[in-house]
Amino acid sequence: DAKTTQPTSMDCAEGRAANLPCNHSTISGNEYVYWYRQIHSQGPQYIIHGLKNNETNEMASLIITEDRKSSTLILPHATLRDTAVYYCIDGSSGGYQKVTFGTGTKLQVIP
Amino acid sequence: NAGVTQTPKFQVLKTGQSMTLQCAQDMNHNSMYWYRQDPGMGLRLIYYSASEGTTDKGEVPNGYNVSRLNKREFSLRLESAAPSQTSVYFCASIPPWNTEAFFGQGTRLTVV
């Protein structure tokens, strides 16, 4: 069973910010929050990760609540190429052997 | 820099046939993983290798074997394919500091 919960699907208008939520109800203190996306059944692509602080890179921003029980991935200006399935996962520094990829959120960017 | 390369990209097998899925990475990573993804589902871990010479079972290992041939290569073998093994198989490579995983483009396997 997935350790994180996400909405099944979301729509976003092209050029607007896409805010994808995730609940991490069982995350432990040493686990990171990771976000990946999968476009057209290609291999998943890493987006961003964080532990406690908010993070930003060239692809997205990650907001983590103070209790770390939820996170939000923000794509600031969504494009049609951002249409994909987005996965949030809890990962430890010990590797991915206990990581569970759920079914993710299908983000549809609408022209 | 090719990253993670999987071969073949597509394969159709008859029930009972065997085959080996190949995965190679050129990033000098220690850890490599094999996942399967069924339609509409998330990825499920089949086997992983934390370092050269070691392999461990994941969530769904039955019907599969693996070989960590060297640091670069991690192969997945189906000894007697079954229709239930129809899936997309992904290999991943993870750097020593265990952050982001680098995935291959997948092998789409159909067992008829």
Image (cartoon, coloured by chain):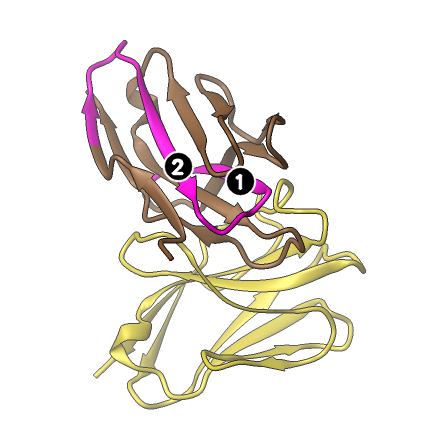
Chain colours: A yellow, B brown
Q: Which residue is mark 2?
A: B23
Query: Marks 2 and 1: CB-CB under 8 Å?
Result: yes
Q: Nearer the viewer, residue A87 or A70?
A: A87
Residue type highlighted by circle 2: Cys
Q: Earlier in the sequence, mark 2 or mark 1?
A: 2
Indicate which disc residue B10 carries: none
Q: Which residue is mark 1?
A: B32
Q: Nearer the viewer, residue A90 or B32?
A: B32
Residue B36 falls within the magenta-colored stretch: yes
Point out residue B109 in the picture as x, y percentages from the top left corner. Answer: 26, 31
Label 2 SS: strand
Residue B17 falls within the magenta-colored stretch: yes
Chain to which the residue tagged by mark 1 belongs: B
In the picture, the quarter occupied by the N terminus of chain A is: top right
Residue furthest right as drawn:
A29
Residue type highlighted by circle 1: Met
Q: Is residue A18 left or right of residue A13?
A: right
| Residue span colored magenta | B11-38
Residue in view at x 29 percent, y 77 percent: A109
The image shows residue A2, relative to residue A57, as above or below, that is: above
Chain to which the residue tagged by mark 2 belongs: B
Label 1 SS: strand
Point out residue A30 in the picture as x, y percentages from the top left corner. Answer: 78, 58
Q: How many marks?
A: 2
The span from disc 2 to disc 1 (Cα, nearest Å) is 9 Å
Residue in view at x 74 percent, y 73 percent: A52
Let me know if marks 2 and 1 both belong to one chain: yes
Residue in view at x 58 percent, y 63 percent: A34
Q: Main secondary structure of the magenta part?
A: strand
Point out residue A26 in the picture as x, y percentages from the top left corner. Answer: 72, 54
